[in-house]
Image (cartoon, rainbow, N blue to C red):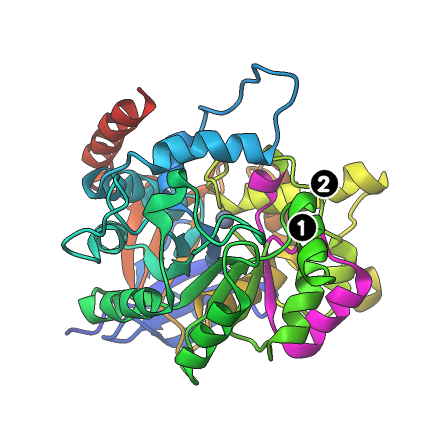
Amino acid sequence: MTTPQPLWAPSAWLDGRWQDAVLLRADASGRWAEITPGVPAPADATRLPGAVLPPLVDAHSHAFQRAFVGLAERRSGDHDDFWSWRDRMYGVALRISPDQLRAVAAQLYTELLAGGYTQVCEFHYLHHGEDGRPYADALAMSRALAEAAAATGMGLTLLPVLYERAGFAQPALRPDQRRFASDVDTVLALRDGVRALGLPQVSAGIAIHSLRAAAPASMHRLIKGLGDDPGPIHIHIAEQTAEVDDCQAATGSRPIAWLAREFELDARWQLVHATHAEPDEIAAVAACGAGIVLCPSTEANLGDGLADLPRWLASTTPLSIGSDSQVGRAWPEELRWLEYGQRLLLRRRNVAADPARAEGATAARLFDRVRVGGAAAAGFRNWGLQIGARADLLVLDEAASGLEGLPASHRLDGLVFATAAPAFAEVWVAGRRVIAGGAAAEGGSRRAACVQALRQLAR
Ligand SMILES: [Zn+2]
């Protein structure tokens, strides 16, 4: 492998602030070897066409749901909520083939790259064929995701999901959940199989669908089976008030309280949709080092409710964001929703800012918090513009509407609160440019293959 050409940026977000004239050098393995501000551009450097930001991790994704966006925004009866949405979403989940999943995921990952993410955590529960029987190749669906990621340059943390029952009081899955069936051994085998693929930027951890979908004994067996494996452990925890109520009825405790008492949570654990959490539950999570994942555009779309963002931010809990159902595919939009939900609820502005700690800029505080939390969610020890981290970066399109003419100090504010579309001119992963001019090199053919799959699945 040859050492990549050095890069030079007019400005870069380093250590929580903009610094100018930055030389960035990746090593032959695609990791940052040098990042130095205040350096004139060397003659052999590639000059990046705008200010540079570290990318974010998309900490929660179900790629196949990209095939369902725009298909659930109508109501026919008196009532529509998460559970009726889910029944309709299963219609796509029951029909998508490995080839269709590969096509949909490749387009999704291209869109997520253009939206400023360079690593995605796939909460993957579509394991079996349409009739519920295992594929001859147990990895068929996982492989489709891994190959889609590798083809686009997206980093992937694949999380095969333990999913074994329909609810606290229902020992088996419903017929329309037949593709999800899994036990401890299959989850561990899928994890190991994905790791053995040896694809670049593809890693694996595990997930537990939710407390309602996995029996405590199985959860304990799975966690014991992990030993000290450092891979992340994700779980849907408290997205809906109905599941909080069911959990209380079944266990006497709320979901986060139960989980924190039942398991020795650590930094590997990621509590997805920690939406409905009481102050003592937030304190319990903060005390153990586990992280939480919020998915603001999806949680809004599904009518989930609002997390107690001020309290989560005030705690030391790692916090990350996810695209989840894929209605939003760019992180600036997620951060905007994260803050806007609170403004609407509390009738205040700049809720996420903390001027008492010299963090008065809302976008910057959310961005830096989510950047660090996302790395933990993906199982990375280091991430972003720092030595040893994967050589990923975003180049801002400073001519984008909402950014052009802004003072340089307010670039993040404009990006999060005033741009309508992803405003990244270039995206680099592991020292390689995967998005240029806002688009991927093979973007046209990828889009065509995805559109064909969408049309087949929307019928
Ligand atoms: Zn989810």
Identity of the residue drawn at 84% across and 65% down: 356
Alpha carbons under labels 1 and 2: distance apart = 26 Å
Identity of the residue drawn at 63% across and 37% down: 300
The answer to which of 186 and 145 lies nearer the viewer is 186
Q: Is residue 241 magenta?
A: no
Residue placed under numbered mark 1 in the picture: 246
Q: Is residue 287 magenta?
A: yes
The local crowd at label 1, few if under 14, some if 14 to 19, many if 20 or more residues have their Cα within 10 Å, is some
Q: Is residue 3 visible?
A: yes
The answer to whether mark 1 and mark 2 are in CB contact below 8 A is no
Residue 178 at x, y = what percent? 35, 45
Q: How many marks?
A: 2
The residue segment tinted magenta is 273-299
Q: Is residue 401 visible?
A: no
Q: Is residue 234 left or right of residue 64?
A: right
Residue 233 at x, y = what percent? 48, 68
Q: For the residue marked with disc 2, what is the amino acid?
A: Gly
Identity of the residue drawn at 78% across and 41% down: 343
The answer to which of 139 and 393 lies nearer the viewer is 139
The local crowd at label 2, few if under 14, some if 14 to 19, many if 20 or more residues have their Cα within 10 Å, is some
- Residue 448 is labelled as none
Q: Is residue 362 left or right of residue 134?
A: right
Q: Is residue 95 left or right of residue 378?
A: left
